[in-house]
Image: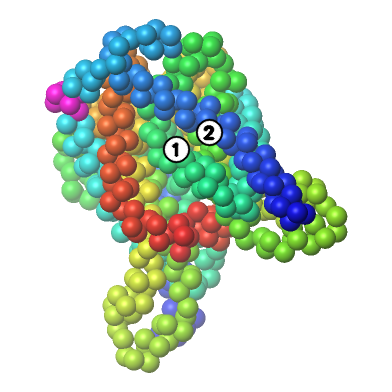
Amino acid sequence: MAAISHKSAERRLAWALLAPAFVAVALLVAWPIWIVVQMSLRPGRALALDQLMSRPLGLANFERVLADPATWSAFAHSTVYTAGTLAPAFTFGLLVALLFNRVFPARRWLRSLLLLPWAVPGVIVSVTFLWMLDASFGVANSVLRRAGLLSTDLAWFVDADTAMLAVIVPTVWKSFPFFAITILAALQGIPAALYEAARVDGASAWQQFRHVTWPGIRRPAMLAVLLNALWTFREFDIIYASTGGGPAGATETLGILVYREAFASFRFGTAAALGVLMLATAAIVVALAMRGLKEEFR
Amino acid sequence: MSAAARRWTLAALAAAVVAIVLFPIYWMFVTSVLPSSLVLSRQPPLVPPVDAISFASYVEVFRRRPVFVWLANSAIVVAGSVAMSLVVSTLAGYSLSRFRTPAQRVAGATLLLSKMLPGSLVVIPFFFMYTTIGLIDSLAGLVLANVAVGVPFATWMMKGFFDTLPRELEQAAAIDGCTPMQTLWYVILPLARPGLAACGIYLAIVSWSEFVLARTLVTKPDHWVVTVGLQSFVGEYLVDWPALMAAGVVSLAPMLVLFLLLEPFLVSGLTSGAVKQ
């Protein structure tokens, strides 16, 4: 009897502690999502909640969004942007993690400095790279000209051919520390004895990486790739603050298109429908990766 | 090569990598302390002449733009949202760590999923709700919106820290006659102080960086936060680069200090909690 009442007191405490989070989640996460879903399913303009709820249900917003070529071009841009960011950010993050897993003087301080870009707000990243990649006075063009690699004033963010590359570079700069940190933590969990055993067996450096290092970091590295893919796919700050989706839509990703539909064209319904489709895409990607994920979140 | 020589070679290599990675921050600073005549050059000097260094752009940008107001607004939003988020996510993180009922699992998964919502989508219902209830253009509204952004990950972070504290602590406290709330307040929280610090710093960085909500939910320039203020320079016909970089340095400096305080926790704490091996 005493055990049971103790158990129920414990359960009350569990709920009481969780209550503020439940209220926060319900009010600040679930309720907004519910509104977005309602908006996407109730075509027409509405400026207040009662107006919105009185509109009939229908799929016109989704039909309109799926038939719009801008959607598919934004989808393609998002995919290119995500893949173009992940591949170099992962590679660079892996390489610096391997370097910083070695023992050398001042490692602790150099590591802190190396990871700094992670803490730089996206808008500041944007304005800094806008300046460095400026056509006439940018330091990047100046260095390239001095090295004889460039003869014109290339306006990286303004030229439609280079704008995507111009937004990818700052994104890579801001994203690689997350990979470096995750992989470094995993590397430090690999027992040194495994490397010793491999060396005794005469394994080359590459064989040690292939058969000792990689199995040790594979899971956290893949989880980091998945999380970063989801974050990059919906990235907004860096692109909006540098090109705003331009020139001529060359960097208009889904995140930017949703915002423009809502706050430039004031079509909240189609913006919400686009957002729901974005979430569905993310959910499909997560579901495909779920088997791996389950093992990470035991 | 001797072991010592190899170590110094590695250190030199690492230092070179760090120098390249930090070049954008260096360049932002260099631009901010040079006069326009040197900055607006087709061959800007990579290492600035020492006698040309001046902080005139800082004086100028504070005089011409309300940078101080932006910084103050950011500080208010950060202080408010960090305090609220920290209370909510500490309690929730403790609950997720110690009680594993279905309710905790559902709450945990929902929190994790909400981290995946695109910011430019979340802002739509917030705009809609805030225009309906009149919270638009208010810093209080921005604080609440930032709580929504920060709580999910902060809760998982706190759960990770609580997971590292042994459960025997609660049992011992119960034997000594503590109620569960007393145990949390007098035993667990003092031990979780490093976790609270790391979590608070993380939240501060996130809300200081936040842009899309601040850009949309607040339109009056008096209520702009620093990210919105900086973005307002972009797209002007003639951007005053030294002034913009000066404003950038001022708004970045507190983040760099916070990050250097947080970094030791990241490799050990955050990774063991949030991204389990």
Q: Position of residue B7 (x, y in %)?
A: 47, 76
Q: Position of residue B40 (x, y in %)?
A: 35, 31
* Closer to us: A127 or A200: A200
Residue ranking furthest to the front: A1
* Closer to us: A205 or B181: B181
Residue ranking furthest to the right: B176
Residue drawn at x 39%, y 7% as measured from the top left: A51
Residue drawn at x 41%, y 28% as measured from the top left: A33
* Closer to us: A179 or A280: A280
What residue span does the magenta drawing correspond to? A65-71
SS assignment at label 2: helix
Give the CA separation, mark 2 to mark 1.
9 Å
Q: Which residue is mark 2?
A: A25
Residue drawn at x 45%, y 74% as measured from the top left: A190
Dot 2 surroundings within 10 Å: few (below 14), some, or many (20 or more)?
many
Residue drawn at x 58%, y 31% as measured from the top left: A23
Residue A177, above or below B113: below
Task: Please state the chain letter of the residue tagged with numbered disc 1 in the rendered image.
Answer: B
Q: Position of residue A16 (x, y in %)?
A: 67, 39
Amino acid beneath label 2: Val
On screen, residue A156 versus residue B145, left or right, reads: left
SS assignment at label 1: helix
Queried whether the magenta region covers residue A67, the answer comes back as: yes
Q: Which residue is mark 1?
A: B114
State whether the magenta stretch is mostly helix, strand or loop: helix
Queried whether the magenta region covers residue B104, the answer comes back as: no
